[in-house]
Amino acid sequence: MIIMSNLVIGYYGHRVGPEINGCIKTGTILTVIGSNGVGKSTFLKTLAGLLPPTSGKLEIVFNNKPKVISYLPQIKNIDCYFPITVFDVVAMGCWPRVRFFKKINSQQRHLILQALEEVQLLDVINQRIDSLSGGQLQCMLFARVLVQQASYVLLDEPFQGLDKMHCKILIRAINKLCKNGCTIVIVLHNRFISEYFIHRDILLLTQHFSAWNTNKNI
Ligand SMILES: Nc1ncnc2c1ncn2[C@@H]1O[C@H](COP(=O)(O)OP(=O)(O)OP(=O)(O)O)[C@@H](O)[C@H]1O
């Protein structure tokens, strides 16, 4: 569960967007919507621990779950020209457990193959990532998220540039994660995608207020 009390987010003490109060329940999918520049990505970065709250309180409760938060930034912020294969990128999801320069074991290899199968990328496993399409790249990065086996998954516009087929693949994988007890926060521009999520909640951010809504008709 994530509890936010009078949470104000921003950069270097400068406030961005409204004050946020509320709670993200464990095992739910929260979609964050709002106009450009209102602070959706800033909110995710704050949840990921990459930015400190400007003021207010943010509490992330893990209980007995692993203290792992997986964060997938917008694809425009990712260097896709690095000479590395699909397998290697997804294997990076094991790093927190394996540490650098150690070999992955057969169990981890199985996890990587399973994640690539989930997003239907097994056939490009040994390809360099600069040979992938935008949709394949996005799915590969999501496969890395799956390998991390996080308690919280934070996704910034994961459907950006995806066709219908790849959207379906991702929606199915996100719902599966949720069924397995993961808590997921997704920044979305197309709010209608949230209708396909199970156990969903919506957070609307505007310049002046934040509002929660469990029904889709915001
Ligand atoms: N690194 C940064 N340093 C200072 N200000 C920033 C930084 N990144 C973003 N901002 C500012 O914070 C505000 C919110 O940006 P953010 O990216 O969170 O908005 P957003 O709601 O995700 O927008 P979009 O829908 O366009 O992706 C914007 O005014 C932006 O200029």
Image (cartoon, rainbow, N blue to C red):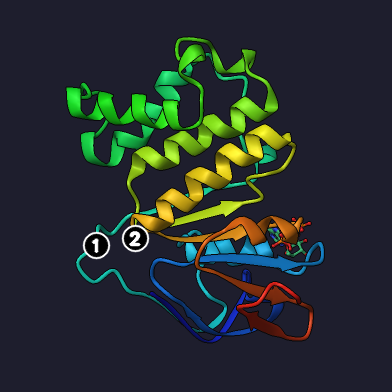
Q: Is residue 207 left or right of residue 146?
A: right
Front-lying residue, 164 or 209: 164
Q: Residues within 10 Å of mark 1 (few under 14, many from 20)?
A: few
Name the image quarter holding residue 178.
bottom left
Instruction: State the image coordinates of residue 58 (x, y, percent, origin top left).
Output: 45, 79
Quadrant where the image shows the N terminus: bottom left
Q: Is residue 105 visible?
A: no
User: Closer to the camera: disc 1 or disc 2?
Assistant: 2
Residue 181 badge: 2
Residue at screen point 66% across, 50% down: 157
Judge whether 153 appears above or below 20 on screen: above
Ligand 1, seen in the image, is in the quarter at bottom right
Amino acid type shown at disc 2: Gly
Callout 1 secondary element: loop
Instruction: State the image coordinates of residue 154 (x, y, percent, origin top left).
Output: 51, 56
Please name the residue that numbered disc 1 is placed on: 65
Amino acid type shown at disc 1: Lys
Q: Is residue 88 visible?
A: yes
Q: Residues within 10 Å of mark 2 (few under 14, many from 20)?
A: some
Whole-Å distance between the Cαs marked 1 and 2?
10 Å
Q: Is residue 48 left or right of residue 158?
A: left
Labels 1 and 2 touching (C-beta < 8 A) = yes
Instruction: State the image coordinates of residue 67 (x, y, percent, origin top left).
Output: 28, 59
Callout 2 secondary element: loop
Q: Earlier in the sequence, mark 1 or mark 2?
A: 1
Front-lying residue, 67 or 143: 143
Judge whether 139 appears above or below 30 on screen: above
Residue at screen point 64% across, 34% down: 166
